[in-house]
């Protein structure tokens, strides 16, 4: 078997994941009448791999800049040009090349940079130019985009959802969400570092099966690999005693922030000027990069580490403050991202997480649409307190809203009160009508206006709002409107717009919900707007927005979203997906539709990417719900 190797390492590459929009943008830039594109981004972001995928199968030439040849004229083009050549002659010789890939263009010698610029000016050769941020760039290269010769694509970090898919492939199985979050935070979009860290964790035997799950979890210290040392060289190289001491004190203070009063201000100013520390709006000081702390702690002597290291019980007051802040946000109907470094540190260390904190953290994640993450936090609480009602309820709600049958069974083993999550349990059983009845009748008239909450601590507004999400808004619209505060008013407007069948109003409410951090609720409102709109163009726009938001909700499968994503597929993809969901193999589908097996596989791969599915397991749910045809 022959494996294609990554352009910059001798390791086998991970499968290419995501980046559909970027791929399409690069491919469009190489069509008739276009002259190419410049792709920029920090080292390790995946620029070279993206370009390789975008031009796969094309007839192209490739040149690469290197630090060792920056002083040699036309060094990057040595394999394409004669030994001695002028710039004018070089342009003539390369004008017959239809597509030229220029990798690491920031490392080109001046002659090669000028040649690339002239090829862009003449426009007969299409160019894809890759440039790393943070390094000096030859003027002839930077003028490609500043002079508007070529458009520029500044590559953003791979989204968390697609990073999770990549990690699943790299680990040989799914990682639990809290481990994915940890790796995502540590690497900050650096895919080379991500691969290095996961490899060290996997090869070092640091992955273990998560509790009550088939997912892998990582707990414990960060392995300080060669790549980690390279990425943290700037902070580890500080040998001045005052600066080194300040950096170590900050490292061992984590996860808590330190006050500027505890340090020499001159030292902090020097460290801030070199972007090694940052100050927040409250005057607290932290290390800039999440890898700096682990690297500094690993480099410290054992006795110094023992003297400075934090213990979980020292974080108790800060953990209580995090819980209070999360609860306050939930009560104010505002779940925009909120830092929770103490809770995340406890999980990373493998320390017990108090069940009360875990339940609130799970609720916050679930309301944001982070369903798998919510289930993981609930499990952390149940690991220490198996009978904790609120954690059991949160696990039930996260599992039932993601269509995860094993997780639902696991949640029921903890016996949450049926009234607390009864409506979503009915959804899991396929009885949506019973779910609506349960949600609408959860509160007696007038109770919610006194600010009562469910036994698990959920505010009345969210319990009533379940009826809106399940399609029974007329039963609770008036009661939601009577709740005090601006937050419940948004939920009430959703109910009223749904009762009125007002598509534009549903889209407006979806925008408000998204702004407040409720990505799943916003996706559901847009999905409901699809059915309410009379204008087909408005319906298509609502569908597009709903699908984009639903993809960020970690496998959400709720009645409002049922069948929605099928509208994003081509007619042929819908046909193949329906047959695959019915259990037909690729070969059987190919024979029935008179297609090649490879064509069927390609259609399924594209459909998985659009549906946010990883395999056939999710397809039956997507095609069997009754609403699938009406969406």
Image (tube, helix red, strand yellow):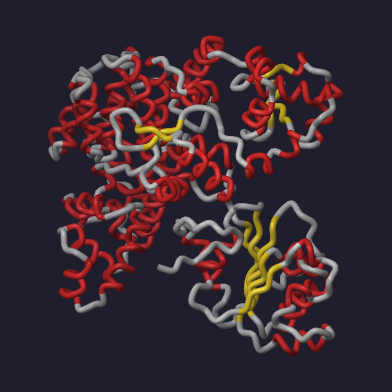
Q: Would residue 198 be seen by someone viewing this image from the given angle? A: yes
| Image quadrant containing the C terminus | bottom left
Q: Nearer the viewer, residue 245 or 279?
A: 245
> Could you tell me residue 325's position as x and y percent?
51, 19
Residue, x 32% and y 52% (percent of image)? 613
| Image quadrant containing the N terminus | bottom left
Q: Is residue 14 left or right of residue 386?
A: right
Report which quarter residue 79 is drawn in.
Answer: bottom right
Q: Nearer the viewer, residue 319 or 52?
A: 52
| Residue 110 drawn above or below residue 327 | below
| Residue 386 drawn above or below residue 219 | above
Q: Nearer the viewer, residue 164 or 576?
A: 164
> Could you tell me residue 32's position as x and y percent?
56, 82
Q: Is residue 590 left or right of residue 117?
A: left
Total numbered labels placed on residues in the image: 0
Residue, x 55% and y 37% (percent of image)? 185
| Residue 560 drawn above or below residue 95 | above
Q: Is residue 516 left or right of residue 128?
A: left
Residue, x 41% and y 15% (percent of image)? 354
Q: Nearer the viewer, residue 451 or 159?
A: 159
Report which quarter residue 557 is drawn in.
Answer: top left
> Could you tell me residue 245's position as x and y percent?
77, 21
Residue, x 74% and y 25% (percent of image)? 247
> Could you tell me residue 119's position as x and y percent?
73, 80
Q: Would residue 477 be seen by someone viewing this image from the given angle? A: no
């Amino acid at each position: 078997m022959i494996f294609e190797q990554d352009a910059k390492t001798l390791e086998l590459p991970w499968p290419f994941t995501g980046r559909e929009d970027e791929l399409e943008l690069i491919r469009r830039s190489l069509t008739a009448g276009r002259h190419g594109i410049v792709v920029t981004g920090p080292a390790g972001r995946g620029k070279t791999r993206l370009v390789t995928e975008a031009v796969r199968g094309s007839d192209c030439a490739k040149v690469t800049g290197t630090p060792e040849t920056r002083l040699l004229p036309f060094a990057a083009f040595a394999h394409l040009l004669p030994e001695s050549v002028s710039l004018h002659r070089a342009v003539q010789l390369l004008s017959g090349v239809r597509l030229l890939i220029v990798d690491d263009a920031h490392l080109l010698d001046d002659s090669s940079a000028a040649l690339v610029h002239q090829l862009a000016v003449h426009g007969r050769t299409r160019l894809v130019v890759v440039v790393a941020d943070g390094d000096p760039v030859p003027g002839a290269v930077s003028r490609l985009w500043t002079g508007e010769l070529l458009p520029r694509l500044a590559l953003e970090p791979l989204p968390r959802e697609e990073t999770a898919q990549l990690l699943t492939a790299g680990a040989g199985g799914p990682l639990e969400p809290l481990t994915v979050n940890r790796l995502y935070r540590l690497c900050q979009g650096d895919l080379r570092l991500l691969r290095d860290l996961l490899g060290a964790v996997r090869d070092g035997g640091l992955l273990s099966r998560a509790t009550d799950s088939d997912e892998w979890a990582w707990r414990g210290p960060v392995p300080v690999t060669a790549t980690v040392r390279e990425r943290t060289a700037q902070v580890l190289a500080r040998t001045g005693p005052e600066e080194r001491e300040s950096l170590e004190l900050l490292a061992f203070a984590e996860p808590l922030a330190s006050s500027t009063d505890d340090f020499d201000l001159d030292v902090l100013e020097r460290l801030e000027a070199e972007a090694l520390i940052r100050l927040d709006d409250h005057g607290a000081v932290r290390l800039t990069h999440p890898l700096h702390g682990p690297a500094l702690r690993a480099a410290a002597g054992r006795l110094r580490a023992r003297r400075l290291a934090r213990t979980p019980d020292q974080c108790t007051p800060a953990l209580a403050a995090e819980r209070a802040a999360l609860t306050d946000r939930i009560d104010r109907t505002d779940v925009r991202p909120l830092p929770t470094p103490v809770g995340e540190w406890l999980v990373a260390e493998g320390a017990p997480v108090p069940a009360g904190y875990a339940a609130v953290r799970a609720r916050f994640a679930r309301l944001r649409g982070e369903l798998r993450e919510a289930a993981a936090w609930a499990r952390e609480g149940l690991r220490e307190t198996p009978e904790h009602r609120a954690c059991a309820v949160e696990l039930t709600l996260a599992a039932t809203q993601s269509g995860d049958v094993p997780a639902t069974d696991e949640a029921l083993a903890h016996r949450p009160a049926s009234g607390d999550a009864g409506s979503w349990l009915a959804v899991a059983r396929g009885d949506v009508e019973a779910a609506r009845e349960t949600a609408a009748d959860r509160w007696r008239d007038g109770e919610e206006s006194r600010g009562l909450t469910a036994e698990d601590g959920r505010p009345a507004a969210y319990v009533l709002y379940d009826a809106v999400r399940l399609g029974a808004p007329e039963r609770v619209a008036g009661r939601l409107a009577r709740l005090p505060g601006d937050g419940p008013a948004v939920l009430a407007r959703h109910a009223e717009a749904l009762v009125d069948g007002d598509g534009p109003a549903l889209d407006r409410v979806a925008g408000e919900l998204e702004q407040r951090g409720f990505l799943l609720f916003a996706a559901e409102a847009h999905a409901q707007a699809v059915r309410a709109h009379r204008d087909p163009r408005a319906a298509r726009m609502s569908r597009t927005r709903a699908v984009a938001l639903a993809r960020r909700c970690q496998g959400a499968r709720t009645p409002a979203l049922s069948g929605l994503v099928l509208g994003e597929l081509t007619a042929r993809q819908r046909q193949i997906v329906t047959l695959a969901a019915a259990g037909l193999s690729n070969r059987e589908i190919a024979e029935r539709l008179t297609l090649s097996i490879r064509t069927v596989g390609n259609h399924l791969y594209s459909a998985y990417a659009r549906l946010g599915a990883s395999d056939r397991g999710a397809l039956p749910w997507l095609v069997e719900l009754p609403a699938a045809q009406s969406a």
